[in-house]
Image: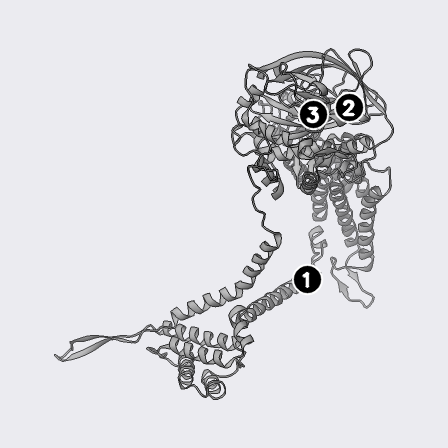
Amino acid sequence: MTAHRNLGFVAAAATLLAAAPLSAIFQRWTWLIEAAIVVAVVAGAAALSRLVRAPLWGQVLAMLAGLTLGLTWIFPGGAELLAFVPTPATFAHFAELLGDSVQDMRSYGVEVPDVDSLLFLTVLGIGGVAVVVDVLTVGLRRPALAGLPMLAIYSVPVAVYVDSVPATPFVVGAAGYLWLLVTDNVDRVRRFGRRFTGEGRDVDVWEASPLAAAGRRLAVVGVAVAVAVPLAVPGMTGGLMNTVANGTGDGTGRPGQGGSPGRIDLFAALSGQLSQSEVTELVKVTTNEPAPFYLRFGVADELRPDGFRVRVPNGRSVTRNLPDPTERGGRGIEQRRYRATVEVTKNLNMPLLPVYAEPVKTEDLSGSWFYDPNLQIIFSNRENSRGKRYAFDYVRSTYSPAVLRAAPSLPADDPVLRGQTVTPSVQAVDKLVAQLVKDRQNDYDKVRAIYNYFSVENGFTYSLSTKGGTSGDDITDFLATKVGFCQQYAAALAWLVRAAGIPARVAFGFTNGSNSDGDTYVLTNRNLHAWTEVYFGGIGWVPFDATPAAAIPGSVHSAWAPDTNAVEDTPSAPGVGPTGGATDPSTGPNQRDPHEKDPDQGLNVGAGGPNQQSPVWPWWLGGALALLALLAVPAVRRSALRRRRRARAVTPAATVLGAVPGPRGGTREVTVGVDAERARADAHAAWDELLDTLVDYEVRVDRTETPRATAERLARESLAEDTGAVTGVRLLGRAEERARYARDPLTGEALHPALRAVRSTLAARADRRTRIMATVLPPSVLLRWRTAVADRSTRLVTTTGRLRDRLLRWNPRRLLAGRPAR
């Protein structure tokens, strides 16, 4: 029965490992903790039932009872007995959770938060699978069939995701299944008794056999093939090797091409559509707004070193009430409600729907579509936009420059500020931003200074033939060449605004297309566009389009972000106008900010410029200084070591305090001696300094000699003509000899002057190269470092060898089954 109990616990652990793919669905790991508790209760109930030799139907009832108790304790309804004994009200609560889970599955998108209904459904499913796996593995001794309920768990994320789930959870689940099979086979082999070799020598059950080794190899190869084949064969997966989703493709596909909203590389899709020579109709939109802004469908707000990335959206069903943007309306903010109808052609296939910003009501959309109020996008994990026709109401907000200029800066603990200002450090970008926003007093003036920089006057031009990356290197190249298309302008503006400490992101959508019938616009791949959105305190996300308007059909500019390349004519009221009629930001109740007259002051290098560009230090100078600092480390180390030894080498002599009365009327002198341990340490420090000096000046050092023999050899060979040096080296040798072998060490001698005399004589006898090396790169320090590295390497090799020996002796079967009694 012990083997059966072990097999039952292995079955429970394998069930939890098989549930690993569910990690792709939930935001947190609460589901795993709760599932582990329930599975442990089920496994314990099964073990107790087998301990009392209950029949199979009794074991099933015990496991179901354990599952019920575990669910009651984790998801109480409030009417339980002793906190875990269920009542009829408990089962009514369970039925309510199951009913809510159906609606919540339609309302929440991947990744879902910790919702009680969805957690209950997940834990109930895993617990039920644990019961089935235990029955198949232990009760019916058919562990191979246990893979079917495990596969049912894996099918859940596959059904939820439009593209495939990550490969790592599948490998974890497969490892659990193989563990279960191996444990069962070990138990079966043990029934035959002790295994023997051909010579009759008995072998422990956990020792490897050729057949077992071959089985393990086949299992490993099978798992590897099962994971690798879907990655290599086209059409078998849509997410693991999806070049568009991972951002490594060439961008020649259509936008998105289905898949999860968080996996789409909108930059690659945008560049691919704009580079196509064929004009393809994508969307028809009808709106009663006289001059609509851009129709948007995506946002990239996660900035990494490799560029902007699309974050996985999260929201609630569009069939519920959507947020009302009029609640944050104030003085100077004009908000009007409009209605639009969108018809998506079969050429646009993506899990996102084009809508105008801030929709408040949708029609003709199912509960599979969700709205993310933070990103202001509509997305789905099950459907796509192809052939969709829907209507929605939206609120259009316009602002005056005065209102944006008066917007307060966000506090330091604001979540939008913390999340949307994360910017990798790029020295060229940071320096440019610091010059642009210098002396700007509010967020809007800083944004306008950066926005005005992307103008033809500063050398920026539009071109589709440039590279479309958004990493730090790509942004630096774009700012240097000043040639690019909309995605570079949008990403660069968002990057620079973030570097100034203001939240910014990149939005994707369509410019206004051709007006075919009054209020109906036809949007093609030529109208695909990217622009920047900046967050202002108390107002929200405000669009800024830095791309040159003349190169973008249907481009729209506003009073707060006018076309920097247009000739400013007669001022008009604040609002939105087409490219040719961009309004002046100075219109309205406020006057023009004097800083906006020359936003690039201090950047242009010219003969008549009032400011000169600060000097730029060559890169090689910094490298040379770093190399010099590195070369100076050995000399600094040697000097510090010499000073420390010098402080110890000055040993005081014994001190006579005076005469005191003796025991019989006489007098005696009281002498305070020097600490013997300190005297020995001082002698050792002086001797070590002498040996390092010999190494520095390339004098032979024999570690097998006694201190007296070394001193006599130096006095005879290296210091023969210098009486002071000879006397000093003999003093150092005698002090070291007394410190090593005598009871009382040598005290009261001037060791430091002796060291100085020996060093001076050795330096005078050495050649110039030796003296320079002893000063700049002391050989004694380098030798000590080499010895330390060699010692650590030896210890590492020894430790690795011991660990390898232990691993060779260890076999996983020790964890699978206990050793049989002899």
Kindly give the residue lying farthest to the front in the view shown.
Answer: 608
| Pointer 1 with pointer 2, Cβ within 8 A | no
**Badge 3 element:** loop
The residues tagged by marks 1 and 2 sit, at their Cα atoms, a distance apart of: 67 Å
The quadrant in which residue 464 appears is top right
Q: Amino acid at mark 3?
A: Tyr
Q: How is the image coloured?
A: one colour
Is residue 342 visible in the rendered image? The answer is: yes
Where's residue 660, x and y in %? 16, 75
Closer to viewer: mark 1 or mark 2: 2
Q: Residue at x 58, y 60 (%)?
A: 627
Figure check: 296 above or below 817:
above
Q: Amino acid at mark 2?
A: Pro
**Badge 1 element:** helix
Q: Residue at x 69, y 25 (%)?
A: 108
Where's residue 7, x and y in %? 72, 45
Figure check: 793 above or below 716:
above
Residue highlighted by disc 2? 553
Q: Amino acid at mark 1?
A: Arg
Name the foreground residue: 792 vs 194.
Answer: 792
The residues tagged by marks 2 and 3 sit, at their Cα atoms, a distance apart of: 37 Å
Mark 1 burial class by Cα count in 10 Å: few <14, some 14-19, many 20+: few
Residue 515 appears left or right of 701: right
Is residue 141 visible in the rendered image? The answer is: no
Q: Which comes sooner in the sequence, label 2 or label 3?
A: 3
Where is the C terminus found, in terms of image quarters? Answer: bottom right
Residue highlighted by disc 3? 108
Residue highlighted by disc 1? 804
